[in-house]
Image (spheres, rainbow, N blue to C red):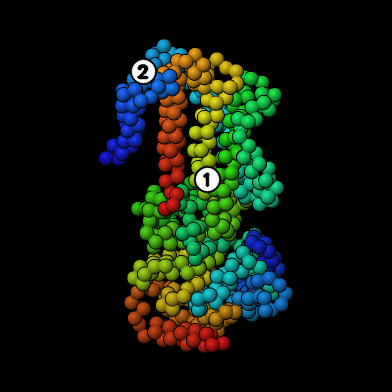
Amino acid sequence: MKRFTIVLLPVGILALWSVGSGIHLFDPLFLPPPWEVVTSLFSGLRSGALVQDLVATVLRSIAGFLLAAIVGVPTGLLMGRIPTLARATQPTIDFFRSVPATALFPLFLFFFGIGDTAKIAIVVYACSLIVLVNTAYGSLQVKEARILCAKVMGATRWCIFWKIVIPESSPGVFAGLRVALSLSFVLIVVTEMFIGTTVGLGYHIMNSQIVYRIPDMYAGIILAGLMGYLANVGLLQIERRLLHWVGR
Amino acid sequence: MNCFTMNSAFPGQLSGTHPRSSCLLEATGIAKSFGSGTSSASKLEVVSDFSLRLETGKLVTMFGPNGCGKSTILNILAGILTPDSGEVVRSSGNASRLSIGYVFQNHADTLLPWRTVRDNISFPLEICRSPVGNRNDRINRRMDQFRLAEHADKYVYELSGGLKQLVAIARATVYDPELLILDEPFSALDYSLSRMLWLRFREFWANQHVTTVFVSHNVDEAVFLGDRVIVLSSRPARVVADVEVPFGADRSLQLLSSTDFFSTRNQVLDAFERGRVI
């Protein structure tokens, strides 16, 4: 029953799309029939071109995501636990959080050139702020009674940080990581569309659009969506395993 | 004989001298107020002229009205709070910190839900970097004493309220602290479960004889567990009576219906009533 409800919406959308295309409700120049998109998807995967694009996008996204986590988690923990640091940095962080990363393309191009570094740097910039804010919020949820109890037992500040603050902040960390993971895929696809490259799903989508190979374009879009979905499922599995204790 | 005065936020910081060797800790003339400002009207006096002598290897229960300042007294004894006046002095042969096991009233918030029962009990030993072999022996012994062995690999959120209390006590005692402080550990449990836990705690205590301060708002619990019952007044807390409990180390639940028990219980309740109108 559970599985049935999960597939209900995608099947419904696919059915509407098929029926709409069958009765020529949609102009194929903007929305080709699903069977054409599926054919294009499989031929792209078979030829290996789409696989190459997919691998390039995944590698860039994962690199950006991991670097964002490496930057965002420790700084978020420090900000959450050191009120002075939080007060001093919060307005600046809120400012940069509100600036769309894609609007800063020229700045990143200036500093990092037009290669993969610029694309990954944009992801690190946008995603680390999300991870940071969620981690800081998570670390504010640490129960003071737990810290006091550890102090009475003679725990050092480092020990409290390592054995209490980090585990208890992890729900916030994971909330940030989940959002950051999806955003890292979106940003990489967008940067591939606009910053020079010859491989990647973003490039594939943009290129297909320019030459009016619309089924190819949708094949790239569907693959990007599937990739994001599967990455989220993987992260949720890890989260369920590690955070089994949350709220209990 | 060297003794050490508790003079800062945590109990590692003890200095001074005191002449009596059988006493582990002595509090004299403790007063504590909360609130801002310098005028007495803006301050809430929680403890006033409180004195207590904790003899080594004795179990003292403290009994008083709700909100009278019992937890504040415990926090002062543990060195978490500094008194406004008075002092807490420690009798000891060396200047090392007084090791304290503290079971907080909100003990569920102090356990670590991401760890199993075994790993929770192991936590203080990790803090003091006890050798791993020795650590396992200590944990196993404590789990056997509190009959927690069958739950060793469960997470604490999988346990009932009573078992969680026992894990909190096992954790607070696994490093053999010199002083054990318990703040109403069984207050959230029903009477029959509480009685079972009194028995289990008393069994443990009869084996260990760790110097203990046990705060309770249940007169039966205070009399059944204590070697002495300190009866406290309404806020600001001060000692109304120090009732000697005339029972031996081994106690069974039959004691609860004995004449001696009722007589001691009545002494405590009389003092309690006096304390409420002081």
Residue A108 versus residue B266: which sits nearer the camera? Answer: A108
Residue found at x 44% / y 81%: B246
- Checking the image for residue A36, the label placed there is 2
**Relative image position of residue B42 (x, y in whole percent):** 67, 76
- Checking the image for residue B198, the label placed there is none
B253 shown above or below A110: below
Q: Amino acid at mark 1?
A: Gly
Residue A225 versus residue B210: which sits nearer the camera? Answer: A225
First in sequence: mark 1 vs mark 2 = 2
Q: Amino acid at mark 2?
A: Glu
B269 shown above or below B164: below
Q: Quadrant of residue A15?
A: top left
**Relative image position of residue A100 (x, y in whole percent):** 61, 34
Spatial CA span between label 1 and label 2: 42 Å
Let me know if residue A55 appears in the view: no
Secondary element at tag 2 = helix
Pointers 1 and 2 within a single chain:
yes
